[in-house]
Image (spheres, coloured by chain):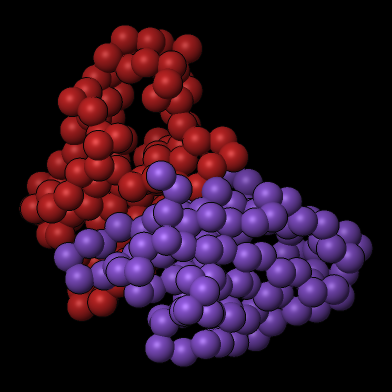
């Protein structure tokens, strides 16, 4: 059972455009939603994270939008740059004593110059 | 380098051999996690330590897999009698004391190829 569904599988954006990646979750106990960026041959790097008490969080060009009632959250990358080309993973966990992240399958983002 | 360190970065082994990977977490991080990532997939949780105690194991962690974290510092992941299906990237992550959630920082991983 896939608890975090991510789309699209791949995305091509022109330099300066907006990249949008969407995730949906099933487990209502999830209370922490991070996004990770992964370059080839590297481990995932924490990019930005949100908790369900806010609907949006912005850090630089990266914004998470969160819709608790729809159980959906998304990553927006403004002014996308070729250096943003990577695989992006959404994830979720439920904290407490359950410290394990459930990841989506990833989105391969390509930003063309 | 103060990040999570994993060794070796790459390992090629013959089917049936045993392999061991090492993870050195960020200093003072008391939580340590192992994940497995196959091509085109997100990381999948394997196991979790808080200090030296192994608190949770995924059903993905068959009896051929064993993880330890002696003295609550570095950790090792051993796979016995490797199978081709074990080929994957094995990722280690750590997080700091008091974190309410899994604010995990990942290492660069060990890529295992079983031939």
Visible in this render: residue B7? yes
Drawn side of residue B81 relative to residue B83, left or right: left
Measured along the vertical axis of the image, is residue A44 above or below residue B91? Answer: below
Quick one: which residue is furthest to the front in this view?
A69
Seen in the image, is A9 located left or right of residue A93?
right
Q: Which sits in the foreground, B106 or B61?
A: B61
* Residue drawn where x is 62% and y is 65% of the image: A22
Left or right for B41, reference A61 = left
Q: Colour of chain A?
A: purple
Frontmost residue, B1 versus A85: A85
> Looking at the rendering, which quadrant does residue A79 occupy?
bottom right
Tell me the residue at 23%/28% (across/down).
B62
Percent x, y for residue A85? 73, 58
- Front residue of this view, candidates A37 and B7: A37
- Looking at the image, residue B98 lies above or below residue B43: below
Coordinates of residue A58 in the picture (x, y in percent): 59, 87
Q: Residue at x 65, y 56 (%)?
A: A7
Task: Examine the image and state in which quarter residue B98 appears.
Answer: bottom left
Quadrant of the drawing holding the N terminus of chain B: bottom left
């Amino acid at each position: 059972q896939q608890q975090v569904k991510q789309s699209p599988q791949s995305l091509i954006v022109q330099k300066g455009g907006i990249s949008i990646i969407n995730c949906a979750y099933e487990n209502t106990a999830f209370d922490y939603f991070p996004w990770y960026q992964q370059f080839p041959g590297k481990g995932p790097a924490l990019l930005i994270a949100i908790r369900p008490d806010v609907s949006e969080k912005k850090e630089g060009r990266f914004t998470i939008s969160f819709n608790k009632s729809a159980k959906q959250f998304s990553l927006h990358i403004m002014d996308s740059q070729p250096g943003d080309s990577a695989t992006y993973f959404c994830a979720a966990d439920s904290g407490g004593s359950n410290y394990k992240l459930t990841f989506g399958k990833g989105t391969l983002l390509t930003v063309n110059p | 380098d103060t990040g999570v360190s994993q060794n070796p970065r790459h390992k090629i082994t013959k089917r049936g051999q045993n392999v061991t990977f090492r993870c050195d977490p960020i200093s003072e991080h008391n939580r340590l996690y192992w994940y497995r990532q196959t091509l085109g997939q997100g990381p999948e949780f394997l196991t979790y330590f808080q200090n030296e105690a192994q608190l949770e194991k995924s059903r993905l962690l068959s009896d051929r897999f064993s993880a330890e974290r002696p003295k609550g510092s570095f950790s090792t992941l051993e796979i016995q009698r490797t199978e081709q299906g074990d080929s994957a990237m094995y990722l280690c992550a750590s997080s700091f004391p008091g974190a309410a959630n899994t604010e995990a920082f990942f290492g660069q991983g060990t890529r295992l190829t079983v031939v």
